[in-house]
Image (tube, rainbow, N blue to C red):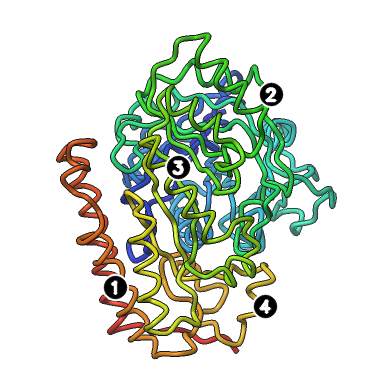
Amino acid sequence: MRILLVRPPRIKQAITLGSFMFSEPLGLEMIYGVLKKDHQVRIVDMMIEEDLLKELQDFSPEIVGITSLCIDVEKVIYIAKKIKEFDENIKTLVGGTQSFLFPESFFHEEIDHIFKYTTKENLLQLMQSLKDNKVDIIDGILSRSLSYHDTGQKGRSQYLSPDRESTEKYRNLYSYFGYRPAAIMELGTGCSKTCDFCLRWRIEGAKEEIIDRDIWMNDLLSIKEPTIMFIDNDLFTDDEKVKELIEVIRENGIKKNYIAYGSVAGILRHKEQVEEMASLGLKALLVGYETFSDKELINYRKKSTTDENREAAAFLKILEIDVWASFMAHPDWDRQDFKSFRRYIKELAPEISSINPLTPFPGLPMYEKYRERLLYVADDYDKWSFGQVMIKPSKMTLKAYYKELLKTYIYINIALNRNTEMIKKYGLFNVLRILGGSIGASSKYIKLMYGSKAKVPD
């Protein structure tokens, strides 16, 4: 069968890190890897090329699979509608984060099958059923023709070997901040830190599961890009995992730039491995410092303190590993809190910083905690992008709160970010690209400051 796999385009009004981190659609590459043996499969990345009609006309698919995040729901349904208008006989499938968390978002006449989770087994089962022109009840899949009944078997998406040749025509555009082109890969899924605000461990599991060494090693050896981003929740959460990675890099003489997520607790616990990785090409770590307040860190269930944040920042400076820090603005901050926050960022001195308002995603306990103060309803999908203020501020007006966010954003990008050093490190083109993303985010904050039209929940 001819199968088209689609990543939806960006939501233009969403405030995300997409201008800074634009990674390959790894999940679709995994599905491609499973299906390519018995089917004709093609991936279209609509974040790069949006002419879906041309793809439909050129490829004439019998099946179209679409991946989804929360902010993508309306766009996914729109794409499915356009597919059915082109040919009502095409079977439409949806998977991804949103279909795992809230599959009912896609209970729509234009969508035929919803993957709550994806495994090699249920993927091949559905393909065989569609080939035989029948619909069976399959673990992890909800089918419209079966009134969305399933087996009730719970599960999580399986890590499968990605086929990176499936996105060959796009690969020179995938990037992480100043590193382009860049590939992404994973050594382990899940996270035992279970931070209160985090969705990812709820999707992948509250315990890290290490991926089979042969799978990730073969993947690592196959990557052509000069930069690799390890997307494990925390590269340094497991001593044995990092030691094996170091061993494989050394034994095979792999020369790459490496980027990874690293927790403060993991960095401080595994200083020796961090230092070894720095000698092998670790250029940057994405670190969630989150806040200047120890009380908030405790409430977030972070496994570190503000002093430990300082210690990790100083240690990484010595190793000349860049820190791309993430912070969250709490809705109960006042102007003095924002001032303290800016001082704290200056003290930590990360090379790049991102600030997101605290976002209590639907389904999280935090959502219930702030339900009465939410500015948008759960199905206002395109607002749930981590960038917009979702909780009504308690100590200032919404406009004043956005003003403080914007002031902080400008302070970081003009006063703190060392643009001359960044140009030397990443090149003028990449710095201009990052700057363009910053300007775009700032302009969206200005629009929200003066024109926010929140739909307050009942």
Residue type at mark 3 is Phe
Residue at the disc numbered 1:
406
Label 1 vs label 3, nearer the camera: 3
Q: Residue at x 80, y 56 (%)?
A: 149
Q: CA distance from mark 1 to mark 3?
A: 30 Å
First-in-chain label (4 vs 2): 2
First-in-chain label (1 vs 3): 3
Label 3 vs label 2, nearer the camera: 3
Mark yes or no: residue 56 visible: no
Q: CA distance from mark 1 to mark 2?
A: 44 Å
Q: CA distance from mark 4 to mark 2?
A: 38 Å
Q: Residue at x 48, y 16 (%)?
A: 222
Secondary structure of the residue carrying tag 1 is helix
Q: Position of residue 345 (x, y in %)?
A: 37, 62
Q: Residues within 10 Å of mark 2 (few under 14, many from 20)?
A: few
Label ID, residue 212: 2
Vertical order, 397 against 115 (above or below): below
**Residue 153 appears left or right of 417:** right
Secondary structure of the residue carrying tag 4 is helix
Residue type at mark 2 is Asp
Label ID, residue 315: 3
Q: CA distance from mark 4 to mark 3?
A: 38 Å
Residue at the disc numbered 4:
368
